[in-house]
Image (spheres, rainbow, N blue to C red):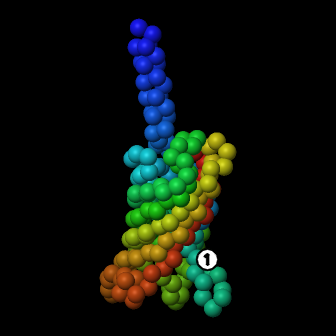
Amino acid sequence: MQTRLFIAGALLALSLQVAKAQEVAGPAFGFELGTFSGVYYEHPLGGHFSLSARAGLTPALSIEDKKLDFYGLIPVVEFGPRYYFSGESSRAGFRTGGYVGLLGSVVLPRWALLQPESARRKDTCVWNEYSKESYGVVPTLGWVFGIGESSYLSLSIGVSAWWSRYESETSKRWESTLKDKEYPIVWSVSYGFRL
């Protein structure tokens, strides 16, 4: 009888340890501030995979002739899978560590906020002045650093491909960065708060 109780206790302890080792962070919802500012949601799909989505504003910046130009804040929606290859799978309800992902992005320059007067003028030839919307695919490499119990710092970089719809008074057309063999670098630094 003592042997059976010992075996049952050992199996229970082992099963609890295995369950704890396989514990995955639950769905996370919160806010991010930085090069992307808005809300985010991440839903884990196991020990290493998750689906993430963000909606918010990002600054429209351009660097030409060593001069940085600001064209306003543009609404953005991002979504896609992530694979966490390092770090903890569970920490304060959000994932930490390195990941690779594939983001799908929808950017709406026609709804830009805080545009300077120069970007609103018709004689200025700026990509976001005529573009109605842009769709992008961004393979991403990133890292999430846990800071405290409910916040984190997120860094990511990726190479993107974009398709944009342009309209003028006389024509409508689609353009792609693939056509010109341009692959813009997309990077993000954000501080997040889990709710």
**Picture layout, residue 102 above or below residue 120:** above
Crowding at dot 1, Cα within 10 Å, few <14 / some 14-19 / many 20+, comes out as: some
Q: In percent of the image, x 62 and y 81: which residue is there?
A: 69
Give the camera-side residue of 60 and 52.
52
Q: Does residue 163 sit above or below 39 in this rendering?
A: below
Q: Which residue is the site of mark 1?
A: 70
Q: Is residue 183 left or right of residue 173?
A: right
Q: Quadrant of residue 143?
A: bottom right
Report the residue at 47% width, 67% height from top.
Answer: 140
Residue 56 seen in the figure: no
Residue 113 locus on image (x, y percent): 55, 67
For this view, does 72 lie left or right of residue 175? right
| Residue 68 spot, x, y in % from top left | 64, 82
Q: Quadrant of the N terminus?
A: top left
Point out the residue furthest to the bottom here.
65
- Give 157 or 7, whichever is nearer the viewer: 7
Q: Relative to 28, say whether 143 is above or below.
A: below
Q: Secondary structure at mark 1?
A: strand
Q: Quadrant of residue 195?
A: top right
The relative height of residue 175 versus residue 107 in the rendered view (above or below) is: below
- Quick one: which residue is furthest to the top in this view? 1
Residue in the picture at 45% in, 81% down: 183
Disc 1 marks which amino acid? Phe
Horizontal relation, residue 99 to residue 173: left or right: right
Foreground pick, 98 / 34: 98
Q: Identify the residue at image location x=66%, y=86%.
A: 67
* Relative image position of residue 192 (x, y in whole percent): 60, 52
Does residue 59 appear anywhere in the picture?
yes
Q: Position of residue 22 (x, y in %)?
A: 45, 39
Q: Report which quarter residue 165 is drawn in.
A: bottom left
